[in-house]
Amino acid sequence: MSPQRSGRLGQRLEGALYYLLLVTVVGLLGWLSQRYETQFDWSHQSRNTLSVASQQLLTRLESPLEIRSFAPPNPELRARIKALIEPYQQIRSDISLVFIDPASQPQLTREAGIRLSGELQFSYQGRSENLGILNEQTISNTIQRLIQQGERWIVTIVGHGERTITGKANHDLGQFGSTLLQKGYRLQSLNLTRQPAIPRNTSLLVLASPQLDYLPGELKLIDDYLNQGGNLLWLTDPGEPYNLSGLFEQRGLGLLPGTVVDANAAQLGLDNPAIAVVNRFPDHPATNHFNRVTLFPFATALKQTDSGDWQATPLLQTQAGSWNETGPMKGEIARSEALGELAGPLTIGMALSRSHNNQTQRLLVIGDGDFISNSYLGNGGNMDLGLNLIRWLTEDDNLLDIPAKTASDIELQLSPTIGAAIGLGFLFILPMLLICTGLLIWWRRRSA
């Protein structure tokens, strides 16, 4: 074989070996990309990466977290939801996301309590919670609440005709109690005549509209519980407070006579004037970002005196056009100043808090027990408000503070002059330059 021919063969072998190695390297890179995954977030403020607080939260998950999205088969909507959940799935592979079309499964949608298109339902260790506002802060805080180990004991006093938290009667709170169980709270009914002690692990004590006087020994147990820093919810109604008023007069609270009447109820199509409408809420941890209409039937108004070392916040207030009616609720009714009926806004819910032994003690008095009863729980935002109040009372409002991630590189601000210059440049100047360049190249080649 001649040297020239041998050289050509060697070059061909070298070329074949080069392409073989190139194909092998590309194949190995493809295999590695399928087996291992590495991502880099070079965006401003790492806005596509979970915050450190969210990442630490996910390490506390002890079992799979299931997320169901009740979103119609809209590719854009589902893609946005998937993009929000994917950073969580990258850290925990046991977080699942399933899409459900509400139109094809209406029964499942109703059972899940879904109200919004695209709403998520989180399920963890038998507890579930729905979420309609989707961002990292709301998602992480929902997961945090579900991680609670169910050690939040809510104890309700019974034996005096109270509304029972497991009862099925219209005036009882059974549906609300079932929702609390789903959220991970633990419920216990307590008769102080049979068990004359309030458990030390009580997170919240509830007095739900008693119909009989408490015995002196029972009142002392409740008073001692409050003096030791316990949290308490008192639901009361118009009429006799059944010797509980003394406990709260010590803490700067009293009751106005009569039943709250609200002329604004007629605007919502409500025939009963004794249904108070509350649609504005103060800047308070119990009602932050809450803006739904709530209804309070047959409520009594509260008055504030000297609250001492307690910090008092009027949490629930009626609108103008309401008053405390002291006469019979028959025929045409009107406010009478002579009878001491006060014009609204009236306070029907008062939140009190104070520092006790380096901890925050919380007390909430609401002049209506019907708003979370089986009869009225589904009206307006009553259910959501009730849950917010319970979370505040049981100190489950200490949520993650995840700052919103903003980026300065996602929006371009141009002055009108610069915008016009860019537009003219792309529409006229740049095309003319390309045409001229092409003509110049053509002329030179022809001249050559």
Image (cartoon, rainbow, N blue to C red):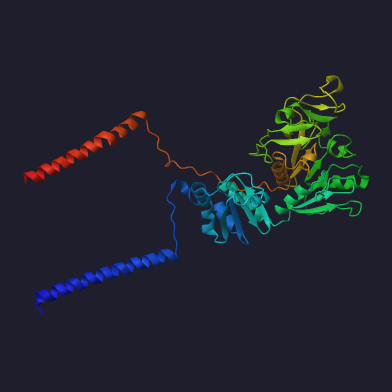
Residue 362: image x %, image y %? 75, 43
Q: Is 270 on the left-hand or right-hand side of 421?
A: right
Q: Is 154 on the left-hand or right-hand side of 87?
A: right
Residue nearest the viewer, comparing 368 with 53: 368
Residue nearest the viewer, comparing 180 with 110: 110
Residue nearest the viewer, comparing 283 with 267: 267
Identity of the residue furthest to the left in this view? 448
Identity of the residue furthest to the top in this view? 338
Q: Residue at x 76, y 36 (%)?
A: 296
Q: Against 4, is 272 above or below?
A: above
Residue 409: image x %, image y %? 42, 42
Residue 156: image x %, image y %? 82, 49
Task: For residue 50, say whether it is visible.
Answer: no
Q: Is 359 on the left-hand or right-hand side of 133?
A: right
Q: Residue at x 32, y 30 (%)?
A: 420
Q: Against 205, is 15 above or below?
A: below
Q: Residue at x 68, y 51 (%)?
A: 111
Residue 224: image x %, image y %? 85, 47
| Picture quarter with the N terminus | bottom left
Q: How many marks?
A: 0
Task: For residue 32, say whether it is visible.
Answer: yes
Where residue 294 sits, quadrant-wise, is: top right
Identity of the residue furthest to the front in this view? 104
